[in-house]
Image: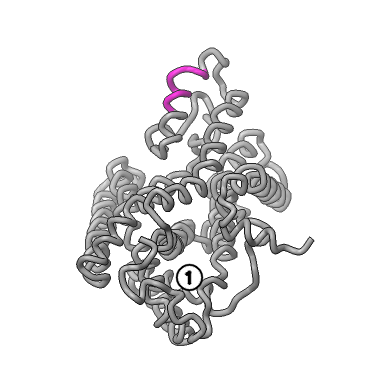
Amino acid sequence: MSSASSSHSNPEAGKGRGRADFNKNNLDCLRLILASIVVLFHVYALTNLAAFWAFGTYLSAHFAVRSFFVISGLLIYRSYTRSSSFASYLEKRVRRIYPAYFTVVVLAAIAMCFLSTLPLSQYFRLGFWKYLSANLVFLNFVAPSLPGVFTSNLVTPVNGALWTLKIEVAFYLLVPVIHYFCSRFGTKKTVGIIFIISSIWKYGFEFLGSLTRARSAYPLDDASNIYEKLAVQFPAQLLYFAAGILLLLYFDKLKFHFRTIAGITACLYLVDHWLAGGALDVLWISGLVFVFGFWRYFGNFSKYGDFSYGVYIVHWPILQTMIFFGLKKLPPALFLMLSVSLVGLASVLMWHLVESRFLKSSSHYRQGSLKAPA
């Protein structure tokens, strides 16, 4: 497994021939930017304050999440091809995401008892255990809310940002299958089939959702919501993950054409924004990830730690709690500064107290921290 299925699947073959070195990338920096976009978007979505309308208008959580999936395809497939066995690969993935995920789910479930409208004797009943069991196995949609918690907020889910994690886990488990089919039938044929299946799912349910919404007297009709939710679930997001795999497999060819790729990416974005209605986003998002990630090296961004994952999984319950205590009545600038500070502090603590402790000593995050200046 440690050797890739073909010569172009190893981005380090021929290193030095181009201007880009795969090991010197800006993907950690990009992920923190994307996580911050999600936070600011949710500041508006959860508070519904007019002062934050720009966050909801000019920032896109969909763009950030899809960019995350492209980056995952690039890095996770590489992790698999560089692992000595499937068990080793899976261990690295579990160590990276589950300790922090477990911590945020369990801490929220216990701590939220103090915010519930129910007495403790009623809080720690079936609803509590359903939330805990469903969320610990990534089935957040089964029980998104805790008994009596955030009932006065605009929405009640304790951590609505966690829905992407089950998709990420599905990708982890699918990588060996994709690798096998690429080895057996070829990369182009395998990834092409993935794109077709994923696109049929994604655009099919988007069409059904828009059709049902147009026929409904209510814009938030339950049926259209079901279609729209299905349109962003696992098969739909697979095309972004597959795009990341392609960036990895053809890295040695693409790295000679950054200016061309940047120009094409800008053109595709404009066409998609003005004419295609988002149908081409996988193309320009992939281009953006590649250009930002590898064209110019910003430096060892991971030497202080990788806070993007922590920012992503802690921000929602923090914002919900602030809203519960009526803090959105504060001046908008103060609310924003306080929320960003709390999210930043929580993510730093999550990294140092939980995430970094479960990584292997060979992890580039731990290696990077060892190289940081005293």
Is 213 on the left or on the right of 284, as rendered? left
Pick the front one: 341 or 104: 104
Q: How many marks?
A: 1
Colouring mode (rainbow / by chain / secondary structure / one colour): one colour
Residue 105 on the magenta span = no
Confirm whether residue 107 shows in the render. Answer: yes
Q: From the viewer's perspective, is residue 12 above or below residue 338?
A: below
Q: From the viewer's perspective, is residue 65 above or below residue 90?
A: below
Q: Around disc 1, counting alpha carbons within 10 Å, would you say few (fewer than 14), some (14 to 19), or many (20 or more)?
A: many
Location of residue 70 in the rendering, given as x and y in whole percent from the top left corner = 42, 64
Pick the front one: 192 or 285: 192
Pick the front one: 287 or 371: 371
Q: Residue furthest top?
A: 121
Q: Name the residue tied to disc 1.
A: 289
Amino acid bearing label 1: Val
Viewport quadrant of the C terminus:
bottom right
Q: Main secondary structure of the magenta part?
A: helix
Which residue is drawn at the image coordinates 67% and 49% (left, top)?
348
Q: Which range of residues does the magenta coloring cover?
A: 123-130
Viewport quadrant of the N terminus:
bottom left
Confirm whether residue 43 shows in the render. Answer: no
Location of residue 27 in the rendering, given as x and y in whole percent from the top left corner = 54, 66
Which residue is drawn at the image coordinates 54% and 41% (left, top)?
99
Which residue is drawn at the image coordinates 61% and 49% (left, top)?
356
Location of residue 177 in the rendering, given as x and y in whole percent from the top left corner = 28, 56
